[in-house]
């Protein structure tokens, strides 16, 4: 099933065409990559999908329902969650409190009975933040801060997760653990759309990769196909593709 479909999305800022006729899908149980050079339009596309940026043309569908005109809140209630390229945390709160805020908000608008404290503890363990659970997030390194943001998104129990450079600031062991977590989430049925510059991570966890360049889809394929694609190698991967 395709819980997320982007169909022919274009975004124009004045005379600048930031996205041009971009289409992609994210399926249940799969990690889908979205890569490309800086300025290719990846974050703009995320903003369109989540309702933070209006598209000039095109549509966004969640579970087959057109949400192109829907608010970010309504899209979240349909099962969409995201993290940000620039960390967006509640800086006055601890790790536990950041995740707890999201869990409590989800409990209230979803009208479900859950033990919020138990849910938060489960998420903290899952993302590997037990040792800093009661630490204010401003005291954390960037890599752990990104895990807090992921944990907060997971507290909303999404069906579709959009991750914008989540491995930035992580060391090798953190990235390896993070990759395993993404595969676990997909195995449980979640659809994951991943923007990331760490090509080793992308090639290891993604079933399919979309490549953007100058706001257009340059290529779509498996990791093997993308690494061998001449235009992708020239525009973005370079020597990384043969590493």
Image (cartoon, grey):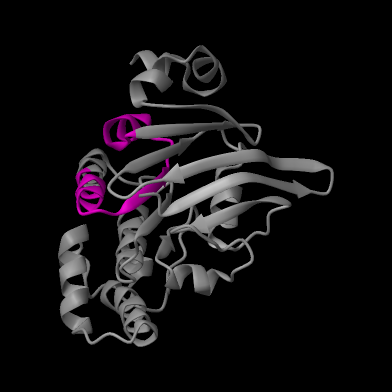
- At which x and y percent is residue 124? 20, 67
- At which x and y percent is residue 44? 61, 49
Give the farthest residue toward the right: 15
Against 238, is 197 above or below?
A: below
Q: Is residue 198 magenta?
A: yes
Residue at figure coordinates x 30%, y 68% from the top left = 157
- At which x and y percent is residue 126? 17, 60
Tell me: 196 left or right of 47. left
Residue at figure coordinates x 50%, y 41% from the top left = 24
Residue at figure coordinates x 33%, y 16% from the top left = 243
Determine the image quadrant of residue 207.
Answer: top left
The magenta segment is 180-207
Tell me: 188 left or right of 88. left
Q: Is residue 133 magenta?
A: no
Determine the image quadrant of residue 224.
Answer: top left
Residue at figure coordinates x 24%, y 53% from the top left = 185
Q: In the depicted view, which residue is nearer to us: 230 or 74?
A: 74
Against 189, is 158 above or below?
A: below
Q: In the depicted view, which residue is nearer to us: 200 or 94?
A: 200
- At which x and y percent is residue 195? 45, 43
Number of marks drawn: 0
Determine the image quadrant of residue 21.
Answer: top right
């Amino acid at each position: 099933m395709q819980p997320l479909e982007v169909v022919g999305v274009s975004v124009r800022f004045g005379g600048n065409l930031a996205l041009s006729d971009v289409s992609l899908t994210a399926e249940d149980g799969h990690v889908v990559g979205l890569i490309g050079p800086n300025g290719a339009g990846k974050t703009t596309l995320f903003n369109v999908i989540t309702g933070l940026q209006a598209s000039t043309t095109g549509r966004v569908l969640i579970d087959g329902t057109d949400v192109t005109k829907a608010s970010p809140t309504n899209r979240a209630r349909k099962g969409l969650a995201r993290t940000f390229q620039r960390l967006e945390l509640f800086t006055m709160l601890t790790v536990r409190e950041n995740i707890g805020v999201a869990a409590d908000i989800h409990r209230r608008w979803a009208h479900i009975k859950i033990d919020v404290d138990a849910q938060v503890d489960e998420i903290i363990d899952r993302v590997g933040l037990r040792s800093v659970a009661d630490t204010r997030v401003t005291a954390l390194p960037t890599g752990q801060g990104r895990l807090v943001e992921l944990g907060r998104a997971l507290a909303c129990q999404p069906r579709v997760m959009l991750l914008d450079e989540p491995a930035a600031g992580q060391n090798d062991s953190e990235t390896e653990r993070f990759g395993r977590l993404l595969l676990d989430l997909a195995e449980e049925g979640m659809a994951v759309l991943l923007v990331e510059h760490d090509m080793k991570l992308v090639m290891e966890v993604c079933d399919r990769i979309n490549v953007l360049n100058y706001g257009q889809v340059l290529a779509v394929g498996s990791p093997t196909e993308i690494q061998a694609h001449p235009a992708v190698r020239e525009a973005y991967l370079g020597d990384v593709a043969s590493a």
